Image: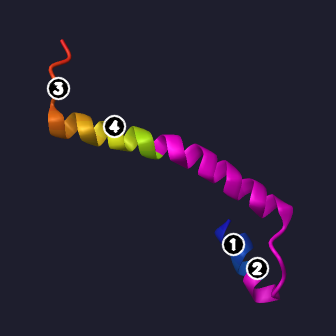
Amino acid sequence: MRNLARSVRDAGALFPAVYQRFFRRQFAFGCPAFAVALSVLWLMLSKPDLG
């Protein structure tokens, strides 16, 4: 995505559809990953008794 964005910037063109598809996919996978990271942080800080 970075290289594609640089080539678009240098050419002064609009982003192609493939960039938009990559962006949506990255966002879709990033949201659950962020929630998992926050959950792990919460588990480390609260140290709940799980068993």
Labelled pair 1, 2 in contact (Cβ < 8 Å):
yes
Image-based side of 45 in relation to 2, left or right: left
Q: Residue at x 76, y 79 (%)?
A: 7
Task: Name the mark on residue 3.
Answer: 1
Labelled pair 2, 4 in contact (Cβ < 8 Å):
no
For marks 4 and 3, give the CA distance. Answer: 12 Å
Where does residue 20 sit, x and y in percent of width and height? 76, 60
Looking at marks 4 and 1 on the same chain, the residue that comes earlier in the sequence is marked by 1
Residue 35 versus residue 7: which sits nearer the camera? 35
Where does residue 42 sit, x and y in percent of width and height? 25, 39
Mark 1 burial class by Cα count in 10 Å: few <14, some 14-19, many 20+: few
Q: Which residues are magenta?
A: 9-33
Residue designated by label 4: 39
Residue designated by label 2: 7
Task: Name the mark on residue 19.
Answer: none
Three-letter code for the amino acid on which mark 4 is drawn: Ser
For marks 2 and 4, give the CA distance. Answer: 37 Å
Mark 2 burial class by Cα count in 10 Å: few <14, some 14-19, many 20+: few
Three-letter code for the amino acid on which mark 2 is drawn: Ser
Looking at marks 2 and 4 on the same chain, the residue that comes earlier in the sequence is marked by 2
Where does residue 44 sit, x and y in percent of width and height? 20, 37
For marks 1 and 2, give the CA distance. Answer: 6 Å
Labelled pair 4, 1 in contact (Cβ < 8 Å):
no
For marks 3 and 1, give the CA distance. Answer: 44 Å
Residue designated by label 3: 48
Say which element carries label 4: helix
For marks 4 and 1, give the CA distance. Answer: 33 Å
For marks 3 and 2, give the CA distance. Answer: 49 Å
* 35 is higher (above) or lower (below) than 17: above
